[in-house]
Protein backbone atom coordinates (compact mmCIF):
# COMPACT_ATOMS: atom_id res chain seq x y z
CA UNK A 1 0.00 0.00 0.00
CA UNK A 2 1.40 3.37 -0.97
CA UNK A 3 2.04 5.75 1.89
CA UNK A 4 1.71 8.70 -0.45
CA UNK A 5 -1.59 10.47 0.26
CA UNK A 6 -4.02 10.67 -2.63
CA UNK A 7 -7.54 11.82 -3.37
CA UNK A 8 -10.14 10.28 -5.66
CA UNK A 9 -12.10 12.47 -8.06
CA UNK A 10 -15.30 10.99 -9.47
CA UNK A 11 -15.01 10.35 -13.19
CA UNK A 12 -18.00 8.10 -14.03
CA UNK A 13 -21.02 8.02 -11.71
CA UNK A 14 -22.77 4.86 -10.51
CA UNK A 15 -25.85 5.99 -12.44
CA UNK A 16 -23.92 6.40 -15.70
CA UNK A 17 -22.36 2.95 -15.26
CA UNK A 18 -25.76 1.33 -14.69
CA UNK A 19 -27.22 3.05 -17.77
CA UNK A 20 -24.31 1.94 -19.94
CA UNK A 21 -24.53 -1.67 -18.74
CA UNK A 22 -28.21 -1.71 -19.61
CA UNK A 23 -27.37 -0.50 -23.14
CA UNK A 24 -24.56 -3.05 -23.55
CA UNK A 25 -26.78 -5.88 -22.35
CA UNK A 26 -29.06 -5.40 -25.38
CA UNK A 27 -26.16 -5.93 -27.78
CA UNK A 28 -24.95 -8.97 -25.86
CA UNK A 29 -28.41 -10.53 -25.72
CA UNK A 30 -28.72 -9.98 -29.46
CA UNK A 31 -25.38 -11.69 -30.08
CA UNK A 32 -26.11 -14.70 -27.87
CA UNK A 33 -29.88 -14.99 -28.14
CA UNK A 34 -29.73 -18.31 -30.00
CA UNK A 35 -27.43 -20.10 -27.55
CA UNK A 36 -28.05 -21.99 -24.36
CA UNK A 37 -24.39 -22.70 -23.70
CA UNK A 38 -22.94 -19.31 -22.84
CA UNK A 39 -20.20 -19.09 -20.22
CA UNK A 40 -19.47 -15.61 -18.89
CA UNK A 41 -15.85 -15.51 -17.73
CA UNK A 42 -14.85 -12.77 -15.32
CA UNK A 43 -11.18 -11.82 -15.00
CA UNK A 44 -10.40 -11.52 -11.31
CA UNK A 45 -10.33 -9.48 -9.37
CA UNK A 46 -11.19 -6.20 -11.06
CA UNK A 47 -14.26 -7.39 -12.96
CA UNK A 48 -16.21 -8.84 -10.02
CA UNK A 49 -18.60 -5.91 -9.61
CA UNK A 50 -19.04 -5.39 -13.36
CA UNK A 51 -19.78 -9.07 -14.04
CA UNK A 52 -22.29 -9.16 -11.18
CA UNK A 53 -24.24 -6.23 -12.61
CA UNK A 54 -23.85 -7.38 -16.22
CA UNK A 55 -25.13 -10.94 -15.80
CA UNK A 56 -28.19 -9.68 -13.96
CA UNK A 57 -29.11 -7.71 -17.09
CA UNK A 58 -28.77 -10.82 -19.29
CA UNK A 59 -31.96 -12.84 -19.24
CA UNK A 60 -30.23 -15.70 -21.02
CA UNK A 61 -29.18 -19.10 -19.68
CA UNK A 62 -25.63 -18.33 -18.54
CA UNK A 63 -22.95 -19.98 -16.50
CA UNK A 64 -20.37 -17.87 -14.69
CA UNK A 65 -16.73 -18.81 -14.28
CA UNK A 66 -13.61 -16.89 -13.27
CA UNK A 67 -10.00 -16.70 -14.31
CA UNK A 68 -7.24 -14.78 -12.59
CA UNK A 69 -4.32 -13.39 -14.50
CA UNK A 70 -1.43 -11.54 -12.91
CA UNK A 71 -1.46 -7.81 -13.52
CA UNK A 72 -0.13 -4.80 -11.69
CA UNK A 73 0.55 -6.38 -8.32
CA UNK A 74 0.74 -3.47 -5.97
CA UNK A 75 2.17 -0.99 -8.42
CA UNK A 76 0.63 1.43 -10.88
CA UNK A 77 2.54 0.10 -13.86
CA UNK A 78 1.56 -2.89 -15.92
CA UNK A 79 3.92 -5.82 -16.26
CA UNK A 80 4.06 -7.17 -19.77
CA UNK A 81 4.39 -10.77 -18.73
CA UNK A 82 0.98 -12.30 -18.03
CA UNK A 83 0.62 -15.41 -15.88
CA UNK A 84 -2.52 -17.39 -15.09
CA UNK A 85 -2.93 -17.50 -11.31
CA UNK A 86 -6.31 -19.23 -11.28
CA UNK A 87 -7.77 -21.14 -14.20
CA UNK A 88 -11.41 -21.78 -15.12
CA UNK A 89 -13.26 -24.51 -13.23
CA UNK A 90 -15.21 -25.63 -16.30
CA UNK A 91 -14.50 -26.80 -19.84
CA UNK A 92 -15.24 -24.35 -22.65
CA UNK A 93 -14.76 -26.54 -25.73
CA UNK A 94 -17.76 -25.96 -27.98
CA UNK A 95 -19.26 -23.44 -25.54
CA UNK A 96 -19.87 -19.78 -26.32
CA UNK A 97 -17.71 -17.55 -24.14
CA UNK A 98 -17.95 -13.91 -23.11
CA UNK A 99 -14.79 -12.65 -21.38
CA UNK A 100 -15.44 -9.78 -18.96
CA UNK A 101 -12.50 -7.47 -18.23
CA UNK A 102 -12.41 -4.34 -16.07
CA UNK A 103 -9.92 -2.25 -18.07
CA UNK A 104 -8.01 -2.78 -21.29
CA UNK A 105 -4.83 -0.81 -20.74
CA UNK A 106 -1.73 -2.04 -22.61
CA UNK A 107 -3.87 -4.97 -23.80
CA UNK A 108 -1.37 -7.67 -22.78
CA UNK A 109 -3.77 -9.32 -20.32
CA UNK A 110 -6.72 -9.53 -22.70
CA UNK A 111 -4.55 -10.70 -25.57
CA UNK A 112 -3.01 -13.47 -23.47
CA UNK A 113 -6.37 -14.60 -22.06
CA UNK A 114 -8.09 -14.60 -25.46
CA UNK A 115 -5.21 -16.62 -26.94
CA UNK A 116 -5.42 -19.13 -24.11
CA UNK A 117 -9.20 -19.53 -24.30
CA UNK A 118 -9.17 -19.71 -28.12
CA UNK A 119 -6.76 -22.65 -27.90
CA UNK A 120 -9.48 -24.57 -26.00
CA UNK A 121 -11.73 -24.47 -29.07
CA UNK A 122 -14.79 -22.62 -27.76
CA UNK A 123 -17.73 -21.71 -29.99
CA UNK A 124 -18.04 -17.92 -30.20
CA UNK A 125 -15.43 -16.07 -28.14
CA UNK A 126 -16.34 -12.45 -27.42
CA UNK A 127 -14.93 -9.85 -25.05
CA UNK A 128 -16.31 -6.92 -23.11
CA UNK A 129 -14.41 -4.37 -21.04
CA UNK A 130 -15.94 -1.74 -18.80
CA UNK A 131 -13.12 0.71 -19.50
CA UNK A 132 -10.69 1.18 -22.35
CA UNK A 133 -7.52 3.31 -22.34
CA UNK A 134 -6.71 3.29 -26.07
CA UNK A 135 -3.76 5.69 -25.72
CA UNK A 136 -1.91 3.08 -23.60
CA UNK A 137 -2.26 0.18 -26.01
CA UNK A 138 0.86 -1.89 -26.78
CA UNK A 139 -0.91 -4.77 -28.54
CA UNK A 140 -3.40 -5.14 -31.38
CA UNK A 141 -6.19 -6.40 -29.12
CA UNK A 142 -9.61 -4.72 -28.95
CA UNK A 143 -12.65 -5.73 -26.90
CA UNK A 144 -15.87 -6.39 -28.83
CA UNK A 145 -17.80 -4.12 -26.47
CA UNK A 146 -16.53 -1.23 -24.35
CA UNK A 147 -18.35 0.60 -21.59
CA UNK A 148 -16.34 3.80 -21.60
CA UNK A 149 -13.21 4.97 -23.35
CA UNK A 150 -11.10 7.00 -20.91
CA UNK A 151 -7.87 9.03 -21.02
CA UNK A 152 -4.59 7.82 -19.52
CA UNK A 153 -5.56 8.20 -15.86
CA UNK A 154 -5.19 5.72 -13.03
CA UNK A 155 -8.72 4.83 -11.93
CA UNK A 156 -10.32 2.98 -9.02
CA UNK A 157 -13.76 1.90 -7.84
CA UNK A 158 -16.53 -0.37 -9.07
CA UNK A 159 -14.25 -3.39 -8.50
CA UNK A 160 -11.02 -1.71 -9.57
CA UNK A 161 -8.25 -1.19 -7.01
CA UNK A 162 -5.22 0.82 -6.17
CA UNK A 163 -2.98 -1.41 -4.01
CA UNK A 164 -6.07 -3.55 -3.23
CA UNK A 165 -8.11 -0.63 -1.88
CA UNK A 166 -11.13 1.24 -3.23
CA UNK A 167 -12.76 -1.71 -5.02
CA UNK A 168 -15.92 -1.01 -3.01
CA UNK A 169 -16.51 2.51 -4.34
CA UNK A 170 -19.79 2.51 -6.32
CA UNK A 171 -18.39 4.88 -8.98
CA UNK A 172 -15.21 5.11 -11.09
CA UNK A 173 -12.83 7.74 -9.80
CA UNK A 174 -9.41 8.91 -10.80
CA UNK A 175 -6.51 8.86 -8.38
CA UNK A 176 -4.81 12.21 -7.85
CA UNK A 177 -1.76 13.02 -5.77
CA UNK A 178 -2.05 16.57 -4.44
CA UNK A 179 1.16 18.59 -4.51
CA UNK A 180 2.95 18.34 -1.15
P1 LIG B 1 -3.22 -4.52 -19.41
O1 LIG B 1 -2.68 -5.92 -19.48
O2 LIG B 1 -2.11 -3.50 -19.42
O3 LIG B 1 -4.28 -4.23 -20.45
O4 LIG B 1 -3.81 -4.35 -17.99
C1 LIG B 1 -5.02 -4.80 -17.62
C2 LIG B 1 -5.17 -4.81 -16.12
O5 LIG B 1 -4.38 -3.81 -15.47
C3 LIG B 1 -6.58 -4.48 -15.77
O6 LIG B 1 -7.38 -5.63 -15.78
C4 LIG B 1 -6.44 -3.91 -14.39
O7 LIG B 1 -6.41 -4.94 -13.43
C5 LIG B 1 -5.08 -3.23 -14.41
N1 LIG B 1 -5.24 -1.79 -14.65
C6 LIG B 1 -5.06 -1.11 -15.79
N2 LIG B 1 -5.31 0.20 -15.64
C7 LIG B 1 -5.67 0.35 -14.34
C8 LIG B 1 -6.09 1.49 -13.57
O8 LIG B 1 -6.20 2.63 -14.03
N3 LIG B 1 -6.41 1.22 -12.26
C9 LIG B 1 -6.32 -0.02 -11.71
N4 LIG B 1 -5.95 -1.10 -12.39
C10 LIG B 1 -5.62 -0.91 -13.71
Image (tube, helix red, strand yellow):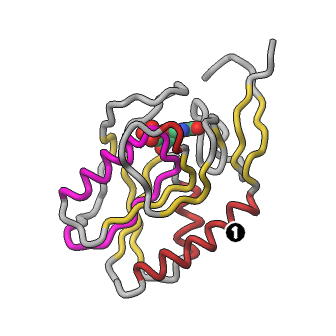
Query: Which quadrant of the rendered structure holds the C terminus?
Result: top right
Query: Which quadrant of the rendered structure holds the N terminus?
Result: top right
**Hey, which quadrant is residue 160 in on the image?**
top right
- Which residue is drawn at the image coordinates 56% and 63% (left, top)? 52
- Which residue is drawn at the image coordinates 59% and 66% (left, top)? 53
Q: Is residue 83 above or below residue 169?
A: above
Residue at the spot of label 1: 19
Q: Residue furthest top?
A: 180
In the image shown, does 172 or 37 lie closer to the viewer? Answer: 172
Q: Is residue 79 above or below residue 50?
A: above
Which stretch is magenta? 93-119
In the image shown, does 52 or 79 lie closer to the viewer? Answer: 79
- Which residue is drawn at the image coordinates 36% and 75% (left, top)? 38
Question: SS for tag 1?
Answer: helix
- In the rendered structure, the answer to whether residue 18 lies left or right of residue 51 reads right
Residue 44 position, x and y percent, is: 45, 48
- In the rendered structure, the answer to whether residue 84 lies left or right of residue 63 reads left
Residue 24 position, x and y percent, is: 57, 70
Residue 164 position, x and y percent, is: 58, 34
**Hey, which quadrant is residue 94 in on the image?**
bottom left
**Few, some or many C-alpha atoms within 10 Å of disc 1 (few <14, some 14-19, many ≥20)?**
few
**Hey, which quadrant is residue 17 in on the image?**
bottom right
Q: Is residue 41 magenta?
A: no
Amino acid sequence: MSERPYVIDEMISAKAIAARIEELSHAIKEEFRDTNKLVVVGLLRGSFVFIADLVRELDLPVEVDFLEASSYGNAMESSREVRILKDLRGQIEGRDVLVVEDIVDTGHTLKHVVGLLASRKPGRLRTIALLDKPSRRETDVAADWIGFSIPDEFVVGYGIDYAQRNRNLPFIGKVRFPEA
